[in-house]
Amino acid sequence: MSLQILCTSLLLSLMFYIFFPHISQQQLQYGYYDATCPDAEEIARQALRLYFTIDPTSSAAILRVSFHDCQVQGCDASILLDSDSAKGITSETASSANFGIRRLDIIDGVKLVLEEACPNTVSCADIIAIAGREAVAFAGGPRIIIPFGRRDSTFASTAEADARLPGVSIGVDQFISLFAAYGMTIAESVAIMGAHTLGVGHCQSFENRLKAAASDPTLGLLFGGQLRATCLADEEGISGTDLQAFFPNDLTNTLFDNMYFQGTVNGRGLFTIDAELPLDSRTADIEQTFAIDQQAFFDSLTSAYLKMTSANVLTGDKGQIRTNCHFVNS
């Protein structure tokens, strides 16, 4: 390791412990793989870039995987575990809150190349954290530097995912409380929502707004009409054949930019929380700032992602390094 890289790593570690003292005891480290798999991040980055290039929609899918993994039991790759009745494991992906979760095969592909390079070394949890930050960077967002050393859970629960993942009608109060648990400021919490700048929303995830459109003051006539034309099969709602119907989160939904905020402040919030954030006194000014200052959004998103991916993780002798991300080691 060069002196410059070593100094940078030490400085980042010092800053991490100063600004996130509640996480410092969990032993995440910058340069964690320097001795055991020094090319781990670059190997993962190259593999991920290939996937993201072939499928430009996959960056949004992978970022969602990273968020949903971290919100249930911490960032421990529990979202990847398949159901196993003998071990009492029920898949988190079976939760209705994980509807639309996809491209888990990308994590499997990165794990495969890392196992070839450095067997039994890089956890599935760290791969998910790397993949999420690379999804942001590949799509044009900030490159986020994070520490490593997460280990993989040996348990997963559909019920836990049901309880921990926010519902489609979450309001601002619940939203603020949810992300405050990660030590996030309100600005960082709003920035996390800005990740909706990538990808699409499935119609069934905001159908509640369409059915209540007559009494929903946040859903404008024009935007509401566009959503209903795309999503509603009839007056009764979404038909079985339309469950895969979707609407883009913003006008540049394969680019990581501040277009999400430009849309929400102009009444084009897709989900309930998207529509309410520009109207609440605690978050309205932040939304306006992010809508005109992309770098301010990127800065808050960077610190928010660091906090989210570092909270409540397994380290040291807790958990394990799974050989196959979908199964607990025998």
Image (tube, helix red, strand yellow):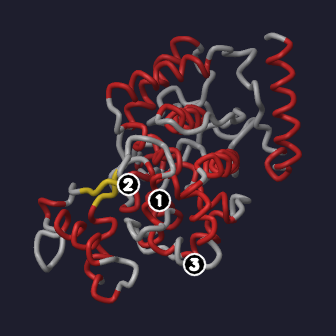
Task: Work out whether 133 lies above or below 198.
Answer: above
The kind of secondary structure element at disc 1 is helix
Q: Quadrant of residue 43?
A: top right
Report the residue at 28% width, 57% height from top.
247
Q: Amino acid at mark 2?
A: Asp
Q: Residue furthest bottom?
A: 215
Across and down, in percent, residue 210 comes to 27, 76
- For the residue carrying disc 3, how many other residues have a C-alpha within 10 Å: few (<14), some (14-19), or many (20+)? few
Left-right relation of 239 to 223: left
Across and down, in percent, residue 326 comes to 44, 36
For the residues labelled 1 and 3, the Cα–Cα distance comes to: 16 Å
For the residues labelled 3 and 2, the Cα–Cα distance comes to: 21 Å
Decide which of tag 1 and tag 3 comes sooner along the chain.
Answer: 1
Q: Nearer the viewer, residue 59 or 85?
A: 59
Q: Amino acid at mark 1?
A: Gln
For the residues labelled 1 and 2, the Cα–Cα distance comes to: 9 Å
User: Does the residue at mark 1 contact the one at mark 2 (Cβ under 8 Å)?
Assistant: yes
Left-right relation of 272 to 224: right
The kind of secondary structure element at disc 3 is loop
Q: Nearer the viewer, residue 137 or 307?
A: 137
Q: Amino acid at mark 3?
A: Asp
User: Circle 3 is placed at which residue position?
Assistant: 280
User: Circle 2 is placed at which residue position?
Assistant: 250
User: Circle 1 is placed at which residue position?
Assistant: 262
Across and down, in percent, residue 258 comes to 51, 51
